[in-house]
Every structure is written in structure tokens, then in C-alpha cells.
Amino acid sequence: MSMMKNKASWKKSSDLAFDMKRKADEAIKVFGKDRVINAVLGVLTDDNGKIIALESVYDCLDKLDRADLASYAPIEGDKAYQEKVIEILFGPYKPKSYIKAIATPGGTGAIRAGITNFIGKGDPLICHDTFWGVYKKMADEFERDFRTYQFLDENYTFNFKAFKEELEKALGDSNRLAIILNSPGNNPTGYSLSNEQWDKLLDLLRKKAEDKDKNLSLIVDVAYLEFAGDGNSQREFFQKFENLPPNLFIEVCFSMSKAYTAYGLRSGAAVGISSDKKAIEDFYLAFAHTARVNWSNTNHGAQKVLVELNKKENLGKYNKDLGMAKALLKKRADIFVSEMAKEKIPMVPYFGGFFAFIPTDKAFDISNLLEKDQIFILPSDKGIRIALCSIATSQIQRLVGSLGKYL
Amino acid sequence: MSMMKNKASWKKSSDLAFDMKRKADEAIKVFGKDRVINAVLGVLTDDNGKIIALESVYDCLDKLDRADLASYAPIEGDKAYQEKVIEILFGPYKPKSYIKAIATPGGTGAIRAGITNFIGKGDPLICHDTFWGVYKKMADEFERDFRTYQFLDENYTFNFKAFKEELEKALGDSNRLAIILNSPGNNPTGYSLSNEQWDKLLDLLRKKAEDKDKNLSLIVDVAYLEFAGDGNSQREFFQKFENLPPNLFIEVCFSMSKAYTAYGLRSGAAVGISSDKKAIEDFYLAFAHTARVNWSNTNHGAQKVLVELNKKENLGKYNKDLGMAKALLKKRADIFVSEMAKEKIPMVPYFGGFFAFIPTDKAFDISNLLEKDQIFILPSDKGIRIALCSIATSQIQRLVGSLGKYL
């Protein structure tokens, strides 16, 4: 009998992305970094493979009062942090709804709190069939019923019909369900829903919410928001989150990891949106309780950085830094897309974000072959994820060459 | 119907310690800090009420490579961090057992992971009857059966008899149980178990583990370790954690918050100890999985600081800083104990740690009266907790005067 309680899910706990990264790191030790292509982890690196830490962000951290770094943040996060998250997340597209934010450890904490608070055991959690593996791990751990629909149809377009069918099936099974949607810059496909697709999706949810016995929650993971558009255009859909029926709740999961190159600081937020004041108050209490009994408060310095950096006098420098990071990513993506077209390898159209995606049901086999060329990617049942964020511009041609060879 | 799933525990989620702190902060705004005594929160402040941030710790953080701050730590924490935690936690008293450490967000994450992994729903979690309220919140959240025994007898000594009775009762009800014990420098009483008391307790657990159907886990919260002795003497009990029966597992919950004045960084570790290699491997997998599905990895910079600071060339400076902090706390404790004796107010003998404790069943009434004198403490069913760590030395006499007036 195990000393750990009888629960199987942790037995298959190893994280493929971190495992592949480890393999790549080992290959670099043996062969040197010029001969290894590490296209695994969702971290933005420069063309020498060094992680990019935006100067403005870390200058700001350095300048903080040590008392701010050392002290506990409130369980729910600093008020100023909460307000700043809401301001910068929505930009000019803040919906006219009740909105509250709570600090979380990265986007992970916000997603976890959504999955455990919106739905109970056995309730459906509907997700696209290409997804960040941790969503399913969470659903399994907390015994939510993880269900998927085909995300993209044969034209690589959001498969509304498949979504609608899955939603209707789940509504037939349960009065309470949640939907998780990772857009813009979906991980792993890079796909972003268009404004028109958002309209269709929200119209459908509004219609289903006419049945007042139903509780619908939509969890929107926007981890790659800053890298999936020109800065504002990719935010337009937020404004659609108003005039919601009271039994349709929306949570946007905010993360500092990518936009502030602050992966290791562990700072994010859960942002609740509702037309019902009571629902937002409940959200705030329930999510604060989740924080209290799991991780307590979160990194105080990171919260202070977000507030400081978004002051007028500092914002110009940060925007310049972010612009350079975005330009680097765009340059790599342009080359990758053009090389892929030359090799005639089909891929999901690139909308932005850290990843490109090649649909195939042989991703694990191909991954094994690529490893022989010292190329490391993230395979899944649905295809191959290429971390454009972490490959050197000069390596793209060799990468696409090997892909062409094995696909 | 609430948009949050039907679960009552979050409805009474507010954290009394943070609420009392807020009251104290508001009083300081109105009356000025010289007229307010804030003896609420477990954070070490100087005599001007400013949080102490050890210079050596934050100098070290400043000097880190920004790539280390920005990058993700592995889910389980850096290998170097894990090794360093084990080394400094046990000092010269490392037990000869299988030992592994996993990074967690503060001590909270380590305790939470213990409560959810060692026992299942409805299994007993045995705790002393004076305890950090979050233990019970966690037990309630995860539906563990929280049971208490009288911690200290009429002589303010560990009530072994009460513990034994509660343990035997729980063993009669369940094959799987966990015990949580916060020592040395127990929060809220300040009490520390002696080496002889540890022997008695472990002998009892060893005896009960002769029944191989039983799974016993002991969670030891040592958040206040560094402030509860001369540096090494309070670690002697760790060496008793060897030759354990395979069905007795021990987890020590390590925190950087107090010893490194790093509350806001959120860094700690779960340290598993077992005579069974397989049990330790299971522990490592299970706790890593808990991290993955709740908070992902933890603050990378904090992990690097622990490793750097404990290098020979940096350790002298840190030990000097820590020594000054400990001396300040000791000075306050000495004055407090002496004033309490003068006023003839009974209190739990002070063993170290951040708190002193006055047993009374009228703590909430007295807290209300103290508030009129602009004195803020943490009341509980069992008594009044005084945060010696956060009051100015010059305020102690007034504090004890008011306590004498109302008790």
C-alpha cells in the first residue's frame, strides 16, 4: 500500500514539455548549442538561446523598495495590482460589466481556480482538442469531466459546429459546465478566434443561458495576448463580454509570464466578469479562499512591478522593449512560414503567439526522428508544436528541412 | 443559484489575521504609528514598524543574473535548491533516511500538499488545539476530518496523554491518518517540544505502526525554526527521524519566509523522510503533480538566493544579519516576559518564535477592548496571540498594561 493516498493521476504526472526541454539541454551539453535546435518550451529567447529578460521590467524590480519585495501581499493581491491588471488587460475594450481581479501564481493558478470553483465533480469541462496538457491534468486531478471538440475544421478555421454539438451534449448531461478557450495565440496551434467567431460563440452561449437552470462559465486563457496582434486589435473581443445573462460567467486568465518575461516570478490574475453584482462578489470570495488554502498570497514584488511599469513615466521604455521582443518573434515567424510554404508542408495559419503547429497523427514518431538531428519539438496526438519563441533565426531553415524530410 | 459551485467553505473565508492587520493599518492612518500597537501579523519589523528585509538576502537577489530571475524553475524546483534546503534544514542533525525535497510556494504549499496527498477524504488530520487557522481551512476545503487534542496541559507542557488518546481514537476510525505538528516556536503559543517529548511521540507512532494496515504521516511545520533556539540545538529532534517503520512517513515543511525575511517571495519546500525508497519516490511524484496542477513551478529567483547565500563566501554576512534580527526579537521577548511577570499575567512559557500566547476563553472580548486602546492582537478560542515580532520595544510596557487591565 502506498504512503500516498490512493489516487492514480500523479503516477503519470511527468510533464512532457519539461522532459523534452531536459533532453534538449542535455543535447546542448554534448553537441553545443549551435548544433541543437530547442523548439520546446514557451519562453522567448534571443538568437543565442538566452532567455530574454526585458530590461525595463528588471530595472523596475531592482528599484523597488525592499520592504515591498519582502512583505506579504494581501491574499487577493494589492488593490493597485488588481486595478492595473484590469486596466491593461482590457485596454480600450473594457466591457461594461461587474469586474474584479484576484492575484494568482501565473496563469496556472487562475485556470486552476476556475476549474475548481465554477464546476463540481463530474461536471463537464469543454476544451478544444488541441490544448495545453495541464488543462486535462487539472480536470483529472479534481475529477471534472474533460471533454473535447475538434477545434479547427479542414480549412483550419474554428469549428463552430463541433463546439455547438459538444456544448449541447454537455448541457444534456449537466446543469453546470465550464468551457476553457485559449485564444488569441492558442497554445499549441497559434490560432486566434476572429471577432465574428467570438460573436457566434457568445450568441450561442447567451441562447443556452436562456434556460435559467443552467450555469455556464467561460474560462478564457489569454497568456499569449501581447504576442498575438498589434497591441489593441486582439483585445476587441473583450468588449463583447457585456450584457451577459446572469448565469453566464466569464473568467479571463491573465499572466505576467510572457508579456513581462516574468515566467519565474509567478504572477498572474483571475479576472471575473459578470452582469450580476452578487456573482462577482461570490467569485472574489471563492477565489480568495482557493488562494488561502493552496498557495496563500503571491509574489509581492511582481505585483509592484506591474503597477510601477505601467505608470506614464515608465511605460514608454517597457513598450519599446516589448516591441523589440515582438519584432524578433515576428521575424522568425515570417521566415518559418515562408520556408514551410517552399517545402509545401501544411500548417495551421500563424496568427501570432509563441508557437506554430503542424497537424499530423505521427507527431511522436517524427519527434523521435527529429531527435536524431538534435531537433527537439513538442509532439502531441494532434500534431507538432514548434516554439518559434525559442529557436534561433539562423536555425529555421535546417528545422524546416528536417520537418520536410520526415513528414 | 450561485455561479460558484455549491461549496460552503469559501463563504466564511475571510482571514482573521489579515483582517486585524487591516484594522491596525487603518488605525495607524488615523492616530499615527506611535499611538497604535500592531501585534497581529507574523512579520518581523524594526522598532519603527518597518518590515526587516535582511540586507544580505536582498543584495544577493539584486546580484542574480536576470536570466535566472526570468526563467521558469523546474516544477519540482532546482536540484541545487532541493539539495541546499535539505542541507540547511537539518544542519548536523540530518537523519539517516531516504530524503527528498520539492519546492513549494512558502510553507503553505508544503502543508497543503501534505494534507491532500497523505490522506483522503474523511481521513483524520490530528492537530493541537491551538493552531494556525489555515490548517483547518485546508482540512475543510479538502474534506479531511480535522480533529484536535489539548496541546498543553495545566502546566503548559505538551499533553502527551491527550495526543495519545486522540491518536488511538483516530486509528480506531481509519487506517490512514495524518498528524500536523507546528514546533519549534509553535504558532500561536510559541511552544517547542523537547527532545524527550519528541522521543515519546515517535515511540508511540512507531508502536502504532506495528499494525501494517495503518498508514501514518507526520507533517512537521518548522516555519519558525530559526527563531526558536541558538541555531542548532532546536534541530536535534530531526535526527530522530531515522529507522522509521515503512508505514510512518514524515514531511518537514520548510519556509524561506521568516528565516530569510522573504515572505513576499513565496518560497518554501516539502521535505519527505522515509525508510522506504519507494515511498520517497511516490512522495516526489505525487507532490510534483500537486505543484503542476495548482501553482506550476515556484519563484526561481528565491531558489537561487537560497543557494547563493549559503555559499561559504556569503554565509557569514547572512548569519550576521540573522543574528541581529534574532537579538532584536529576543530583547522584546525578554522585556515582555518580565513585564508579564510583574503584572502576574499567566502566559505559555516563551520558547522562541515570533509569538507569545496568553490562554483565555475571552480572547475576542478582550481584543475588542484592546482595540479601544489602539492595540491589535490576534484572538482565538484558546487565547490571545501577541506578535512579538512586530511590536516596537518601547510599546511593550503599554501593551502589557492594557492586557493587565482587561484580563
Image (cartoon, coloured by chain):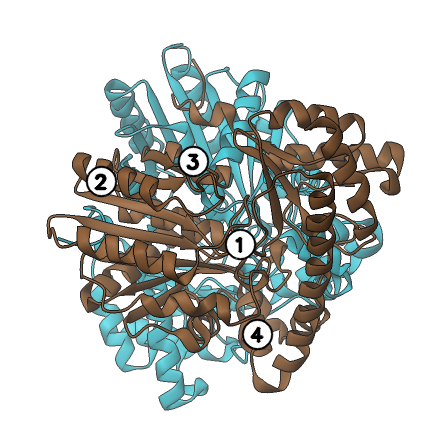
Chain colours: A brown, B cyan
How far apart, in angstroms, are the residues tagged by discs 4 and 2? 61 Å
Give the residue at x 60% y 76%.
Answer: A309
Q: Residue B335: x, y in percent?
A: 50, 69
As rendered, which of B191 and B13 lies closer to the eye? B13
Q: Where is mark 2, residue-wise? A: A168
Q: Residue B277: x, y in percent?
A: 59, 17
Q: Are marks 1 and 2 in contact (CB under 8 Å)?
A: no
Determine the image quadrant of residue B63: bottom right
Q: Are marks 1 and 2 on the same chain?
A: yes
Q: What amino acid is labelled 4 in the image?
A: Asp
Query: What numbered label is drawn on residue A136?
Result: 3
Residue B27 visible somewhere in the drawing = yes
Q: Residue A371: x, y in percent?
A: 75, 28
Q: Where is mark 1, residue-wise? A: A185
How far apart, in angstroms, are the residues tagged by discs 1 and 3? 19 Å
Q: What amino acid is labelled 1 in the image?
A: Gly
Q: What amino acid is labelled 2 in the image?
A: Glu
Q: Is residue A293 left or right of residue B246?
A: left
Q: Is residue A252 left or right of residue B144?
A: right
Q: Where is mark 4, residue-wise? A: B46
